[in-house]
C-alpha cells in the first residue's frame, strides 16, 4: 500500500485483503450450479466451496451496500460444506465447523427470530449428532426445530419434510424403528428425487435389518448403492451388509 500524497512509507497489505487470482475464483453462479456435488462428489465440492468462500470474503470486504448479503451467502455455503464433510466421512471437521457456525449466527437470537438459515444449520447439526450417535442431544435439537416450525413460513412443506426426515433417522437408528418405518413410508410416497430416495432406501434397509427381514434389507441396500455415491453412505451400506452376512453365517452355522 502506498499513499504518495501523504507519505513516502510503503507497507505490505496482509494477504487476506488481496484480490483472489482469476483462475482461483469460484463465483456464486458456479457454486450454485454445483450443489449436486455435495452428495455425488463431496471431496470436489469441499475444494470448490473453500475457493468460493475466499472469493465471498473478499467481496464482503469491498462491498458497501451488500455486506449482509455476502455474510448470508458465506454462512449458507459453510453449512453446505458441513453436509459435504459428513458425506466425505469427516465428522470431526463437520462438528468443528458447525460449532463455529452456531457461534456466528447467535443461537438465542436465531431461535427468537426463527431464522430459516438457522433451521438449515440446525438440521446439519442434528445430522452430525446422529452420525456420532449422540442421540439424546439430537432429540433435544429436533424438539427445538419442531418448536421453531410451529410459526408459519414460506416453503413450510420443505421444512416439515426435513423435520420428518430427522425424526425418521432418530427413530430408525435409536428409539422406535417401527415408528421410523411409518415415517419412511410417508417420505417415500412424497419423494421422487433419485438421490433423496437413495438415502431413504438406505434407512429402509436398516429398518428391515432391525426387523430381521434379511432379503428385504439386502434388496434395499442394493438399490441404495446403485444411487448413492458419497463415501459415508457407502460405508453405512457396507457396515449393514457385513452385519447381515454375519447373522446369516451364524444361522447357517
Image (cartoon, rainbow, N blue to C red):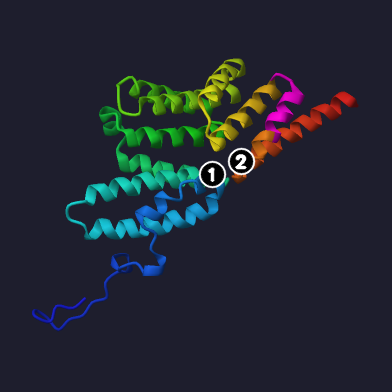
Residue plotted at (31% across, 40% down): 105
- Relative horizontal placement of residue 88, taking residue 56 as reference (left or right): right
Q: Which residue is mark 2?
A: 228
Q: Is-magenta flag for residue 219?
A: yes
Secondary structure of the residue carrying numbered label 1? helix
Given residues 223 and 15, the one toward you in this image is: 223
Where is residue 170, by image quadrant?
A: top right
Residue numbers of the magenta segment: 211-222
Given residues 174 and 65, the one toward you in this image is: 65
- Relative horizontal placement of residue 140, taking residue 10 as reference (left or right): right
Where is residue 175, by image quadrant?
A: top right
- Relative horizontal placement of residue 65, taking residue 208 as reference (left or right): left
Question: Quarter of the image containing the N terminus?
Answer: bottom left
Where is residue 149, by image quadrant?
A: top left
Q: Are marks 1 and 2 in contact (CB under 8 Å)?
A: yes
Magenta portion: prevailing SS class: helix
Local packing at callout 2 (Cα closer than 10 Å; few below 14, some 14-19, many 20+) is many
Residue plotted at (34% across, 37% down): 117
**Residue 132 in view:** no
Local packing at callout 1 (Cα closer than 10 Å; few below 14, some 14-19, many 20+) is many
Where is residue 145 drawn, in percent x and y?
A: 39, 26
Above-or-below relation of 222 to 157: below
**Which is more N-terminal, label 2 or label 1?**
1
Where is residue 236 drawn, in percent x and y?
A: 65, 37
Above-or-below relation of 81 to 181: below
Amino acid at each position: 500500500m502506498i499513499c504518495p500524497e501523504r507519505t513516502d512509507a510503503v507497507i505490505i497489505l496482509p494477504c487476506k485483503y488481496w484480490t483472489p487470482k482469476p483462475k482461483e475464483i469460484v463465483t456464486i453462479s458456479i457454486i450454485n450450479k454445483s450443489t449436486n456435488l455435495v452428495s455425488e462428489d463431496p471431496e470436489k465440492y469441499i475444494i470448490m466451496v473453500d475457493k468460493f468462500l475466499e472469493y465471498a470474503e473478499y467481496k464482503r470486504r469491498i462491498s458497501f451496500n451488500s455486506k449482509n448479503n455476502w455474510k448470508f451467502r458465506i454462512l449458507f455455503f459453510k453449512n453446505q460444506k458441513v453436509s459435504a464433510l459428513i458425506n466425505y466421512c469427516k465428522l470431526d471437521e463437520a462438528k468443528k465447523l458447525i460449532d463455529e457456525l452456531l457461534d456466528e449466527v447467535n443461537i438465542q437470537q436465531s431461535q427468537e427470530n426463527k431464522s430459516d438459515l438457522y433451521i438449515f444449520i440446525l438440521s446439519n447439526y442434528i445430522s452430525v449428532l446422529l452420525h456420532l450417535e449422540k442421540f439424546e442431544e439430537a432429540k433435544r435439537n429436533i424438539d427445538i426445530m419442531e418448536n421453531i416450525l410451529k410459526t408459519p413460513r414460506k416453503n413450510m412443506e420443505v421444512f416439515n419434510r426435513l423435520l420428518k426426515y430427522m425424526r425418521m433417522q432418530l427413530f430408525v437408528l435409536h428409539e422406535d424403528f417401527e415408528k421410523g418405518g411409518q415415517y419412511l413410508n410417508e417420505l417415500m410416497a412424497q419423494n421422487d428425487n433419485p438421490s433423496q430416495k437413495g438415502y431413504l432406501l438406505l434407512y429402509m434397509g436398516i429398518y428391515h435389518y432391525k426387523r430381521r427381514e434379511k432379503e428385504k434389507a439386502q434388496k434395499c441396500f442394493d438399490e441404495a448403492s446403485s444411487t448413492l455415491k458419497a463415501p459415508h453412505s457407502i460405508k453405512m451400506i457396507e457396515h449393514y451388509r457385513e452385519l447381515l452376512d454375519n447373522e446369516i453365517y451364524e444361522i447357517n452355522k
